[in-house]
Amino acid sequence: QSALTQPRSVSGSPGQSVTISCTGTSSDVGSYNYVSWYQQHPGKAPKLMIYDVTKRPSGVPDRFSGSKSGNTASLTISGLQAEDEADYYCCSYAGSYTWVFGGGTKLTVL
Amino acid sequence: EVQLVESGGGLVQPGGSLRLSCAASGFTFSSYSINWVRQAPGKGLEWVSYISSSSSTIYYADSVKGRFTISRDNAKNSLFLQMNSLRAEDTAVYYCARLNGLNFDYWGQGTLVTVSS
């Protein structure tokens, strides 16, 4: 499968909101409500931030939210904080116990 | 506390083999499917392989099919990845990740595999 398409970078000032898009196909994002988002700080393991398109694991601030329309999923971070600066990856279930990730988006908090 | 700890990475020559391990603790290992996900230096994440809780179902990414073998030992709370015929493009940090529903909810810290002569 081909990787999902994410913008290489996004930026925002503290307190602002940013949205990261994740575009797939009708075989992955468009077919399943199993899109997840992962935050990765340099040298660290990925951390689950959003699962099943819109759900937040316990402990993840409600500033993080997810949505999906057609073949495109989105992660919105509101009230940006310095500690949100990281790489973000989307992931979609692609059927038959296979998954596809996005190329990653570097979030810079100005 | 859920913990996944990978080991076994290192430097290997092209064409060589390596066996990675992932030791799990803090949860009932035998009840969860586990995956391997890798990340080449400076690159994004790539799903590699899936194994169901009972080992009855296994899948691989096309990029590793026929060269990598995933297995697990529920009695020892351990996951393995046997990697053969290694190529330069297999160079990456390899993570084990627990599957919850169809999402990866816990990840290990990763182990680096470098394929180079």
Image (cartoon, grey):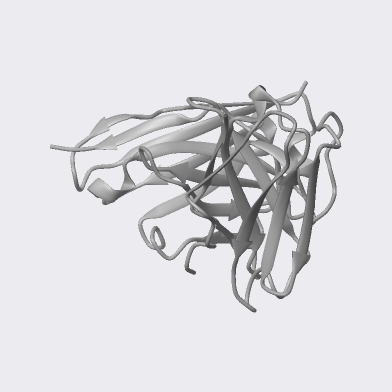
Q: Where is residue A29 in the image (x, y as percent from the top left)?
A: 67, 68
Question: B91 or A85: nearer the eye?
Answer: A85
Q: Using the rendered view, name the quadrant where residue A92 is placed.
A: bottom right
Q: In this view, does B19 lie to the left or right of A28?
A: left
Figure disc tally: 0
Residue for point 56% across, 61% down: B59
Q: Using the rendered view, name the quadrant where residue B3 is placed.
A: top right
Examine the rendering and report whether any part of residue A41 can be seen. yes
Residue for point 53% across, 46% down: A105
Q: Using the rendered view, name the quadrant where residue A93 is placed.
A: bottom right
Question: B103 or A19: nearer the eye?
Answer: A19
Q: Position of residue A100 (x, y in %)?
A: 56, 60
Question: B45 or A6: nearer the eye?
Answer: A6
Question: A10 or B30: nearer the eye?
Answer: A10
The C terminus of chain A lies in quadrant: top right
Residue for point 47% across, 61% down: B61
In the rendered image, the vertical position of residue B75 relative to residue A91, given as above or below: above
